[in-house]
Amino acid sequence: MEKFVPFEKLSKKKQHAYQAAKRGTWGILNPVTRKPEHPKAYNRRKARKWSDDSMTVPFVFFASTRISCVLRLPRGSF
């Protein structure tokens, strides 16, 4: 028969093993608290989707046309 040792006097490894043996499982229940997102709050994912949208392509086209128009100006019209 082993001699009784109080929990506080056990080594850290044995304390951890004892606590792990007593610890149970939640099963299918997920204990994470959830709440709905605030509708007026800034959402980075939504902003990123907007920038990845195909609407940015005409801006790039516009910028490139503008540069080509600037290059076509006569030399003395600066």
Image (cartoon, grey):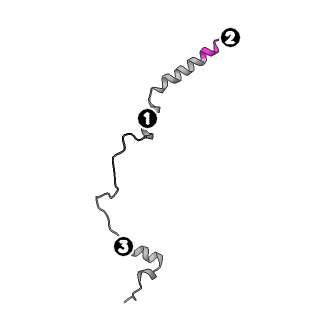
Q: Residues within 10 Å of mark 2 (few under 14, many from 20)?
A: few
Q: Secondary structure at mark 1?
A: helix
The residue type indicated by label 3 comes to: Ala
Circle 3 residue: 21
**Residue at image coords 39%, 39%:** 40
Magenta stretch bounds: 68-76
Q: Amino acid at mark 1?
A: Lys
Of badges 1 and 2, nearer the viewer stands: 2
Give the residue type that dot 2 points to.
Answer: Ser
Q: Quadrant of residue 19?
A: bottom left
Q: Name the residue: 33% across, 46% down.
A: 36
Task: Give how far apart the Cα atoms at labels 3 and 1 are.
Answer: 46 Å
Q: Which residue is mark 1?
A: 49
Name the image quarter holding the N terminus. Answer: bottom left
Which tag is nearer the camera, tag 3 or tag 1?
Answer: 1
Q: Which mark is residue 77?
A: 2
> Badge 3: few (under 14), some or many (20 or more) residues near its Cα, within 10 Å?
few
Q: Position of residue 56 (x, y in %)?
A: 48, 27
**SS for dot 3:** helix
Which quarter of the image is occupied by the C terminus? top right
Mark 3 or mark 1: whose residue is earlier in sequence = 3
Q: Quadrant of residue 14?
A: bottom left
